Amino acid sequence: MKRERYERRLFRVFAQAGYSPSRILTVTPEQMVEIPNITVPNIRTVLFLQKKLSGERDAIRRALMIEEFLRMADFGGKPHG
């Protein structure tokens, strides 16, 4: 439950700053520090996610991870299937 609240907060902070959930995957650290109400743990989480996805060599697995991330963003942190 705590993880879901954290994810929802992260998506809300980005949405309030005018970023779509998919933009989280490409936003730069310089852009993140300009976002109001963003915290260091939020920035670390985004950087970890970006690094994890960029390091994934298997294109199908990477696509599935991105798809799951976007589902969570659209449905308030509740993964599907």
Image (cartoon, rainbow, N blue to C red):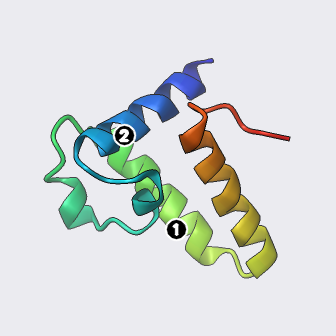
Question: Quick one: label 2, few (<14), some, or many (20+) residues within 10 Å?
Answer: few
Task: Report the quarter where the N terminus lies.
Answer: top right
Q: Are marks 1 and 2 in contact (CB under 8 Å)?
A: no
Percent position (x, y) of residue 24? Answer: 41, 57
Percent position (x, y) of residue 35? Answer: 18, 47
Residue matched to label 1: 51
Front position in the image: 5 or 19: 19
Q: Earlier in the sequence, mark 1 or mark 2?
A: 2
Front position in the image: 7 or 73: 73
Residue that appears at 36% across and 34% down: 12
In the rendered image, is residue 58 in sight?
A: no
Percent position (x, y) of residue 56? Answer: 68, 74
Question: Quick one: label 1, few (<14), some, or many (20+) residues within 10 Å?
Answer: few
Front position in the image: 33 or 26: 26
Residue matched to label 2: 41
Task: Report the quarter where the C terminus lies.
Answer: top right
Residue that appears at 72% across and 81% down: 57
Q: Residue furthest top?
A: 1
Residue that appears at 59% across and 65% down: 52
Percent position (x, y) of residue 64? Answer: 75, 63
Residue that appears at 36% across and 40% down: 41
> What residue type is disc 1 on?
Lys
Question: Is 43 positioned to the left or the right of 74 in the image?
Answer: left
